[in-house]
Image (cartoon, rainbow, N blue to C red):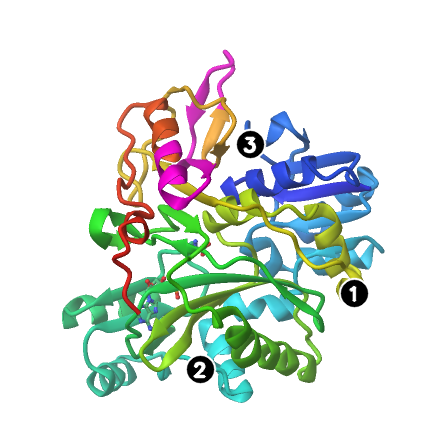
Amino acid sequence: MRVLLIGSGGREHAIALGLAADPSVDFLAAAPGNPGIARVAELHEVTATDPAAVAALAVEVAADLAIVGPEAPLVAGVADAVRAKGIACFGPSAAAARLEGSKAFAKDVMAAAGVPTALSYACTDEAAVRRALDDLGTPYVVKNDGLAAGKGVVVTDDRATAEKHAADCGKVVIEQYLPGPEVSLFVVTDGTTARPLMPAQDFKRLADGDAGPNTGGMGAYAPLDWAPDDLVPQVMREVVEPTLAEMRKRETPFAGLLYVGLALTPDGPKVIEFNARFGDPETQVVLALLDTPLGGLLKAAATGTLAAHPPLRWQEGAAVTVVVASKDYPGTPRTGDVIEGAERPGIIHAGTARRADGALISAGGRVLSVTATGADLAEAREAAYALVDGVRLDGAHYRTDIALGAVEDRIKL
Ligand code: AMP
Ligand code: GLY
């Protein structure tokens, strides 16, 4: 089949590698792509958030399947426009992507579906913000209602910081703090049938020891040997099935990738957030361990035939990814620095670009995610950091403790 992949980040590079390894994929195009993706796909220019332009490109490359990686195009209706051309598309409709596009909408769906999540208030004015903060207490959790590239959430004990974030955002959701380790569970669904992938853990904070501000994600690993054995069936039963049923009931079925961000609290797993697409960088580790051909799986979800798809197969062992970020990320990252040692297997490109002279340069905040597998987590971790050591990028920084707590058995439920 002929596949068009939309996006240009590390997640899309990981998806492109999965598609390139699938024998049923005989042509792969990507738009806009990046220099890493260019090694396995034909790149096209497109404004990813322009539904008509993406649909026209899907027709032009005669795609049998389009896959939309990032959230902004989904929220803009790109999947709807592609499907309107009669082309199968992996990714939810704009109406269903509101599960990510509006935190207040997601909370409303969760309440209607009886999904365990943090108590919350949607607020649009200062008085409501103050009441919600008074009621819920510290640590304060203040979330921008709309898309914010992983940087819309402030968790703080400082009242002034919480109020300022709320004022800066306009519409916010203020919610109860959920204690406990976080888990990202990706679920492939055609709207009715749902297949969970392997749970992974993301590191959202900038610095070692979970210090510093939230980012888009600084690293990830899988599997989670410390997680309860029945975690996935429990989340499918208590979260995924009721949410998909509620979306069908609203006549906006959710088909694509439902990303369930969870906190494993003392009262059981509770939803921190939904996303409408694969997570970045968790996808890098989950897909590194998936043996089932990716194109066939996503095609089945896009065509409503997931029930007939064989059970998923996984590699033994573990995977770790470490994000290498540019100087000053997540503020205003410096770009245009030359990167050396990054054109090797396991190095997933995100914010990279090719200069006219052929040099690879940084072009965004999260530049690379260095991914390795191993017989166990400790081996995968060592292999990932050995690869990081070979990358040269002036001013770059990365966390040195990705997967360390799990390797040292320090994660407590
Ligand atoms: P979100 O974009 O909603 O995933 O939030 C980003 C990060 O903020 C999460 O991964 C958590 O680390 C943190 N966070 C969000 N909501 C909560 C909450 N209710 N309790 C504790 N931490 C939270
Ligand atoms: N890694 C978090 C996200 O993709 O939203």
Q: Could you tell me which secondary element the residue under label 1 belongs to? A: loop
Instruction: Kindly give the residue lying farthest to the top in the view shown.
Output: 357
The tag earlier along the polypeptide, 2 or 1, is 2
Quadrant of the image containing the C terminus: bottom left
Along the line of sight, the residue nearer the viewer: 85 or 288: 288
The tag earlier along the polypeptide, 1 or 3, is 3
The residue tagged 3 is 34
Which amino acid lies under the numbered mark 3 shown in the image of this protein? Asn
Q: Residue at x 59, y 35 (%)?
A: 33
Along the line of sight, the residue nearer the viewer: 84 or 219: 219
Please tell me whether residue 73 is drawn above or below residue 322 in the rendered image. Answer: below
Which amino acid lies under the numbered mark 2 shown in the image of this protein? Pro
Image label count: 3
The residue tagged 1 is 304
* Pointers 1 and 3 in contact (C-beta within 8 Å): no
Across and down, in percent, residue 76 comes to: 61, 59
| Residue 411 in the figure: left or right of residue 113 | left
- Magenta stretch bounds: 354-383
Along the line of sight, the residue nearer the viewer: 111 or 52: 111
Point out the quarter of the image occupied by ligand 1.
bottom left
Distance Cα–Cα, label 3 vs label 2: 38 Å
Q: Residues within 10 Å of mark 1 (few under 14, many from 20)?
A: some
The residue tagged 2 is 116
| Residue 52 in the figure: left or right of residue 87 | left
Tell me, yes or no, if residue 365 can be seen here.
no
Please tell me whether residue 47 is drawn above or below residue 342 in the rendered image. Answer: below
| Residue 47 in the figure: left or right of residue 130 | right
Q: Residue at x 28, y 60 (%)?
A: 411
Q: Residues within 10 Å of mark 2 (few under 14, many from 20)?
A: some
Across and down, in percent, residue 109 comes to: 54, 81
